[in-house]
C-alpha cells in the first residue's frame, strides 16, 4: 500500500534521512522505532507532504505521491495524527472533528463518521462544545485520533501516541488503535515505547541516525541483539 | 450638549465602517501574520475606481461597488499569490518593506492617473439628512453603519458556522495541523486576502458620499486601521469592532471640540493610554 524507495530528506542544510526504504501492506500495523532525532517524524512528515524529500520515491497504492501537497495526500486517505496532538485549542471539539472531515472524499460522510467517533470516544461526546484546549492530554489524543477517523483514513500514521499520557490513557488509546486495526485500517505506528509497539505491530523498522538499522517481523526485530541492547537494556 | 450628541452619534456610526476596514486586515493577519501597510491605499484604489465609473457611466458609489468588489477581490488574490506568497516566512522586515513599496506604488499611480486635485463622487443620498432627537445626521453615515454592521455579522457567521470559517480559524491557530487535516493552506490564505481587500471596496463606497479624495489619503486609513487592529488584539473579532467604535468616537469628539491638529491627535493619545493598561488589546488576542 505504501512504498518508500531510497528516501533522502532534511531541513535546510541538515540531512536527516539517508536512503530510507520501507513498505506497508494493506491492513498491516507496522511499527517505526527509533531514539529521539532518529528521523521518525521526518519520515512521516515526508509521507504527509509537509517535508519535501530531496531524493527518492513515495508510492501510495501504486501512485507516485512524492512532493504531493498535504491536502491532496489527505484526500487520498493517508492521515497523520501528529506528535503532540496539535488540536486547535481555541476551537470546539465539534469544530475540530468537523475539520477532520474537511477533505472532499470525507465530507459526504461527516455526520455518520461523527457518530462513530463519539461512539468510540464517549468522553468527547460529553464535551462537544468545549474548547479543545481545555481537554487533558489523553482526551486530546482521543480527539486527534477522532479527527483521523473523521477523515475516512485508509492509512493512519500515528506519531508518538503515548507521549506524555498516563498509563491508563496509554492502555485505552492502544486498545482503540488495536480495534481500528482489527476493523481493517492500515496503521503506521511511530513510537519510542518499544514494548507497546512490539505488542501491537506485525512488522517493525528501527531507524538509527536517519537510516533503517533493523527491519523485519516483530519477533525478529525484538530479538535482534542491537534492539535488545538499545531498547531492552540486555 | 447637542454638539456632543452629534459628535458621539457621528463617531459611533463611522466607527462601524472603520471596524469593517480593520476586520479585513485582521482576517488577513490571522491567516498569514502579514500586516499590510498598503491596506488604506487599496481602499483609495477602490474609491478612485468609483470615480472612474461615475465619470464613465454616472454610476452611484452604492451601485459601482458591485464592480469594485470583484475587482478588488482579484487584486487581493494577485497581491497574495504573486507578491506576498513567495516571501511569506522570510524576514518580517522584508514584508513590511514590500507593503510600504506598494503604498508608494499605489499613491503615485493614482497621482499619475487622476492628478493631485481633490475629487468627489456625488451620490443620490449624499445631502439627505434625518433627525435623531434633536440631532441632525447624514443618511450616508447611517447607511454605512447599517451595511458595516450587517457585513460584520455575516463575517462572524462565516467564521463560526461554515467550513471556510473553520479552515480560516485552523490556519490561524496552527497552519501545519490545518494542512495535516486536509486544509489547502495556500488556497485559504489567497481567498482571505481576496476577501479582506474586497471588503475595502464596500467600505470605500460607504465612505465615499460627501468625502473628498486625494491620492495620499490611503496612509490615513492605514494608520487608523492599524490603531484599531492593535486595540482589537490583532485577530480578536469583537475587539476589532470595539476598536473601530473607540477610534471613530474619539476622532469625531476630537475634531468637534478641539481645534485643528489637536483634534486629530485625540485618537492616537487615547490609543497610547489604552495600550499602557491593555497591552494585549482591549479583549486580548483572540
Image (cartoon, rainbow, N blue to C red):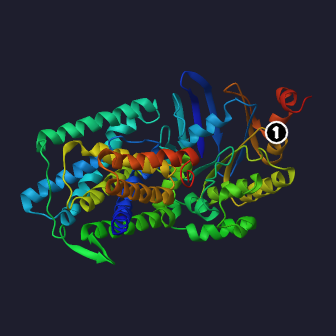
Residue at 72% x, 57% y is: A135
Label 1 sits on a secondary structure element that is: helix
Rendering coords of residue A60 (x, y %): 55, 45
* Image quadrant occupied by the C terminus of chain A: top right
B142 relative to B173 in the view: left or right? left
Rendering coords of residue B176 (x, y %): 55, 44
Q: Nearer the viewer, residue A199 or B282?
A: B282
Rendering coords of residue B180 (x, y %): 56, 48
Pointer 1 local density, CA inside 10 Å: few below 14, some 14–19, many at least 20: some
Q: Is residue B29 visible?
A: no
A151 relative to B111 in the view: left or right? right
- Find the residue positioned furthest to the front: B1
The answer to which quarter of the image holds residue B101 is top left
Q: Nearer the viewer, residue A8 or B181?
A: B181
Residue at 34% x, 78% y is: B133
Task: Identify the residue position indicated by label 1 in the image.
Answer: A194
The answer to which quarter of the image holds residue B3 is bottom left
Residue at 59% x, 23% y is: A15
Residue at 21% x, 53% y is: B47
B149 relative to A63 in the view: left or right? left
A19 relative to B122 in the view: left or right? right
Rendering coords of residue B205 (x, y %): 24, 60
- Find the residue positioned furthest to the left: B56
Q: Is residue A49 visible?
A: yes
Amino acid at each position: 500500500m505504501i512504498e518508500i524507495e531510497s528516501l533522502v530528506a532534511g531541513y535546510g542544510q541538515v540531512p536527516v534521512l539517508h536512503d530510507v526504504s520501507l513498505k506497508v501492506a494493506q491492513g498491516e500495523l507496522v511499527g517505526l522505532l527509533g531514539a529521539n532525532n532518529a528521523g521518525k517524524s521526518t519520515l512521516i512528515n515526508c509521507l504527509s507532504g509537509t517535508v519535501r524529500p530531496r531524493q527518492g520515491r513515495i508510492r501510495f497504492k501504486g501512485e507516485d505521491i512524492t512532493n504531493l501537497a498535504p491536502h491532496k495526500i489527505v484526500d487520498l486517505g493517508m492521515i497523520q495524527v501528529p506528535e503532540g496532538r496539535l488540536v486547535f485549542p481555541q476551537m470546539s471539539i465539534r469544530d475540530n472533528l468537523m475539520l477532520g472531515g474537511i477533505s472532499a472524499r470525507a465530507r459526504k460522510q461527516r455526520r455518520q463518521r461523527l457518530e462513530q467517533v463519539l461512539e468510540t470516544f464517549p468522553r468527547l461526546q460529553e464535551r462537544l462544545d468545549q474548547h479543545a484546549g481545555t481537554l487533558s492530554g489523553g482526551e486530546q489524543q482521543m480527539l486527534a485520533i477522532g479527527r483521523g477517523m473523521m477523515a475516512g483514513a485508509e492509512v493512519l500514521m500515528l506519531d508518538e501516541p503515548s507521549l506524555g499520557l498516563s498509563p491508563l490513557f496509554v492502555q485505552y488509546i492502544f486498545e482503540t488503535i488495536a480495534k481500528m486495526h482489527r476493523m481493517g485500517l492500515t496503521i503506521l505506528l511511530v513510537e519510542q515505547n518499544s514494548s507497546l509497539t512490539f505488542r501491537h505491530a506485525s512488522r517493525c523498522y528501527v531507524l538509527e541516525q536517519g537510516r533503517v538499522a533493523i527491519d523485519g517481523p516483530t519477533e525478529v526485530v525484538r530479538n535482534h541483539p542491537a534492539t535488545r541492547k538499545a531498547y531492552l537494556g540486555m | 450638549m447637542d454638539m456632543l450628541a452629534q459628535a458621539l452619534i457621528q463617531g459611533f456610526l463611522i466607527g462601524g465602517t472603520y471596524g469593517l476596514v480593520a476586520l479585513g486586515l485582521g482576517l488577513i493577519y490571522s491567516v498569514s501574520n502579514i500586516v499590510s501597510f498598503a491596506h488604506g491605499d487599496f481602499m483609495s484604489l477602490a474609491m478612485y475606481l468609483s470615480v472612474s465609473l461615475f465619470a464613465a457611466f454616472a454610476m452611484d458609489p452604492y451601485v459601482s461597488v458591485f464592480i469594485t468588489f470583484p475587482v478588488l477581490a482579484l487584486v487581493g488574490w494577485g497581491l497574495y499569490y504573486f507578491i506576498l506568497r513567495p516571501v511569506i516566512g522570510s524576514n518580517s522586515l522584508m514584508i513590511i518593506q514590500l507593503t510600504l513599496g506598494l503604498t508608494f506604488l499605489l499613491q503615485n499611480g493614482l497621482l499619475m492617473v487622476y492628478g493631485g486635485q481633490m475629487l468627489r463622487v456625488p451620490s443620490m443620498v449624499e445631502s439627505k439628512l434625518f433627525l435623531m432627537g434633536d440631532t441632525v445626521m447624514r443618511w450616508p453615515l447611517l447607511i454605512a453603519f447599517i451595511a458595516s454592521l450587517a457585513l460584520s455579522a455575516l463575517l462572524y457567521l462565516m467564521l463560526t458556522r461554515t467550513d471556510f470559517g473553520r479552515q480560516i480559524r485552523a490556519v490561524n491557530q496552527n497552519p501545519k495541523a490545518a494542512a495535516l487535516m486536509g486544509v489547502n493552506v495556500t488556497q485559504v490564505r489567497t481567498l482571505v486576502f481576496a476577501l479582506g481587500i474586497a471588503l475595502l471596496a464596500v467600505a470605500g463606497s460607504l465612505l465615499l458620499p460627501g468625502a473628498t479624495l486625494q491620492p495620499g489619503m490611503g496612509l490615513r486609513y492605514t494608520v487608523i486601521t492599524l490603531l484599531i487592529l492593535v486595540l482589537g488584539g490583532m485577530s480578536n473579532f469583537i475587539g476589532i469592532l470595539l476598536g473601530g467604535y473607540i477610534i471613530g468616537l474619539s476622532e469625531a469628539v476630537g475634531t468637534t471640540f478641539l481645534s485643528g491638529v489637536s483634534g486629530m491627535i485625540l485618537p492616537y493619545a487615547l490609543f497610547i493610554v489604552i495600550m499602557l493598561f491593555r497591552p494585549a488589546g482591549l479583549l486580548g488576542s483572540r
